[in-house]
Amino acid sequence: MIKCVFSRYEHKYMLDLVKFNRILPQLEEYTVPDKYSRSGSTYPINNIYYDTEDDYLIRRSLQKPKYKEKLRLRSYGVPSTGSLVFLELKKKYNGLVNKRRTAITLEKAESFVRTGIIPEDDGIINRQVAGEIAYFLSMYKVYPKVVLSYDRIAYFSEDDSDLRISFDFNIRARRSNVSLEDGDYGEPILNRRLCLMEIKTSQAIPLWLTQILTENELYSRSFSKYGTEYTNTVSAQMKERYI
C-alpha cells in the first residue's frame, strides 16, 4: 500500500563529494538502501512546483513564517500521460513537516490542478488527501512554475524507526516547457560538486548518526530547492535589467 501521510522533521546538510564518499561507508553500517538505490546508483526525481501568478507562496516561504505550504507534482523518472505520479501538499509548522500525497495519473493530476475538481474515484486516488488539495486550490489560483529535477540515493534505518537519509545530486531546474513529460533537463542551481543530504525522522536523530555528523563537521542548515531556484531567477532578472 502506498503511504499517503508523513509527519516528520527534516534536517538538511550541504556536502561536497569528498565528504559524501567519506561518510557513506559509516552510514551503511546502520542503514540499508531503499528499493530504488539497491544497485548503488542514483535514480531521477522530477517535480513541478505550483505557485500563484505573482509567486506568493515561495515569496512567503522565504520570509520563514511559522506556517507555510506548497503544492508539487512528483514523478520518478520521466512519465507519460497514463503514468502514475504523486500530487503532494506539504505543510510546515514550527519545523514539523506534514506531507499529504495521493497517487494519480499524470493526465488527471494536471486536470485536477487546473480545474480544482477532484477526479472521479478510480481506486487509486486518496480521497481524503485529494479533498485537502482541493481546498488548497480553492484558496490559491496556482500555475506550474518550475520543473526541479535531481538524482537521488536514499537509505533507511535497519531498526523499526522511520529514519530516512537521502542524498540529492545534480539539482537542476527550468522555467520553460514546464511539463514532466518533457524530460528531466535543466540548469544547475548549485555547484555540481555539492550534494544535499536530508535526514527525515519523526523522532530525535539517533546517537550513532549524531556522532557521524559531529565527526565529519556536518551542521544542519536551512535550504529550499525551490527557494534557491527562485532567488537565482530573480537575481538573474535584476542583472539583465541593469546591463
Image: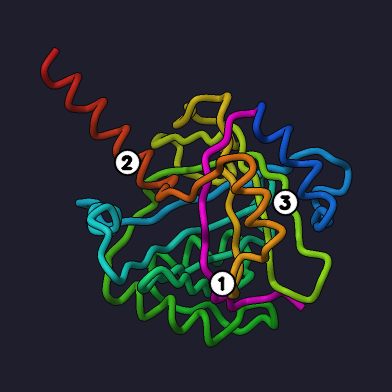
The Cα–Cα distance between marks 1 and 3, rounded to whole angstroms, is 19 Å
Q: Which disc is residue 230 wearing?
A: 2
The quadrant holding residue 69 is bottom left
Q: Position of residue 210 (x, y in %)?
A: 63, 57
Q: Residue at x 43, y 53 (%)?
A: 49
Closer to the chain start, of discs 2 and 1, is: 1
Closest to the camera, between mark 2 and mark 3, is 3
Distance (Cα) linking label 2 and label 3: 26 Å
Sequence order check, earlier mark of 2 and 3: 3
Magenta span main SS: strand
* Residue at 78%, 45% in the rendered image: 26
Instruction: Confirm or deny contact between disc 1 and disc 3 (CB under 8 A).
Output: no
Label 3 sits on what residue type?
Ala
Q: Which type of secondary structure does the marked residue at label 1 adopt? A: strand
Q: Are marks 2 and 1 in contact (CB under 8 Å)?
A: no
Residue situated in front as seen by the camera: 165 or 22:
22
Q: What is the C-alpha distance between the residues marked 2 and 1? A: 24 Å
Residue closer to the observer: 31 or 49: 31
Q: Is label 1 or label 3 in front?
A: 3
Q: Secondary structure at mark 3?
A: strand
**Residue position marked by numbered label 3 in the rendering:** 154
Q: Which image quadrant: the N terminus?
A: bottom right
